């Protein structure tokens, strides 16, 4: 006669009952939602994918992905440069409509157009850790726009086509700079101090392929400086 072995412990029935209760509660919630739809409910809600669903008189009329942000990451949210969207718009020359907080990140969303990021108080900031233009709203970076940001490790600007001089000067913690469309790194093809004083880092720069041979067949002078003074990986795209 074969042996029958029951795995688990005496709590197994309780765990199963808890799971069944949770499943039943979820089914009830789903039923209530669809009852609301059939009753002509109107409103918006966020689905499991984070999309914003709009319902009018029981009919789903749109499903929209949430807007992508200009994301600022701080060493501590209490050290954020500004706390209102209006202050950021004044500093950056943008017209964002919403500022939300996610941990140590600030997310600026709702900008109606692209803009050139000017020289601003983001430069010389010792609390900014990363800036990621997920919204692809920044088309250029002004003179020394992100210089002397001592703890800035990451700068990602997928839509930026040009920078002025000394943009990242003395931002000595940089390890990732992403500028895939940037065809003007500084005001000349020589060394414009874009990466001046960044020394001894392991750093990855992604930049437009035209920068590889733009200086008489040689790379842009700022890339030459970066490579000579750091363990640099240059990705031309």
Image (tube, helix red, strand yellow):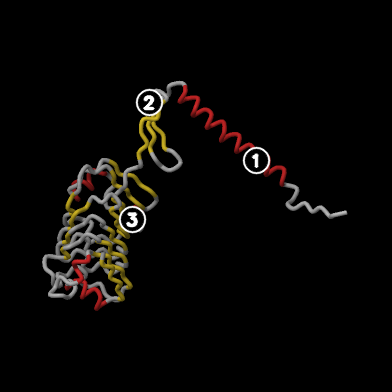
Report how far apart the C-alphas of labels 3 and 2 lie in the structure: 37 Å
Image position, residue 168 (x, y; %): 22, 65
Please tell me which of labels 3 and 2 falls first in the chain.
2
Taking depth in this image into account, of 17 and 53 the one nearest to the observer is 53
Name the mark nearer the viewer: 3 or 2.
2
Q: Please say if the residues under marks 1 and 2 sit with CB atoms less than 8 Å apart.
A: no
Alpha-carbon span between mark 1 and mark 3: 39 Å
Residue at image location 68% in from the left, 39% down from the top: 17
Total number of numbered discs in the rendering: 3
Give the residue at the far bottom of this rendering: 228
Q: Quadrant of the N terminus?
A: bottom right
In this view, the mark in front (1 or 3)? 1
Give the residue drawn at x 29%, y 41%.
Answer: 98
- Label 2 near label 3: C-beta < 8 Å? no
- Indicate the quadrant where residue 111 lies: top left
Tell which of 2 and 108 is nearer to you: 2
- Residue depicted at 75% across the width and 53% down the height: 7
Q: Position of residue 120 (x, y in %)?
A: 18, 55
- Residue bearing the label numbered 2: 56
Residue 73: numbered disc? 3
């Amino acid at each position: 006669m074969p042996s029958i072995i029951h795995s688990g412990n005496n709590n197994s029935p309780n765990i199963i009952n808890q799971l069944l209760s949770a499943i039943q509660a979820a089914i009830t919630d789903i039923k209530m939602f669809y009852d609301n739809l059939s009753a002509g409910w109107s409103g918006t809600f966020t689905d499991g994918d984070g999309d914003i669903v709009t319902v009018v008189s029981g009919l789903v009329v749109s499903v929209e992905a949430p807007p992508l942000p200009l994301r600022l990451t701080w060493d501590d949210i209490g050290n954020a440069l500004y706390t209102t969207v209006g202050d950021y718009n004044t500093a950056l020359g943008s017209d964002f409509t919403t500022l939300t907080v996610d941990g140590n990140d600030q997310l600026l969303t709702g900008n109606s157009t692209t803009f050139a990021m000017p020289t601003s108080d983001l430069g010389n900031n010792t609390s900014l850790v990363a800036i990621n233009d997920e919204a692809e709203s920044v088309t250029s970076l002004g003179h020394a726009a992100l210089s002397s940001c001592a703890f800035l490790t990451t700068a990602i600007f997928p839509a930026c086509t040009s920078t002025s001089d000394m943009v990242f000067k003395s931002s000595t913690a940089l390890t990732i700079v992403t500028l895939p469309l940037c065809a003007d790194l500084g005001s000349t093809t020589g060394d414009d101090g874009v990466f001046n004083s960044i020394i001894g880092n392991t750093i990855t720069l992604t930049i437009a392929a035209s920068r590889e041979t733009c200086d008489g067949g040689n790379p842009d002078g700022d890339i030459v400086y970066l490579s000579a003074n750091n363990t640099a990986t240059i990705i031309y795209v």
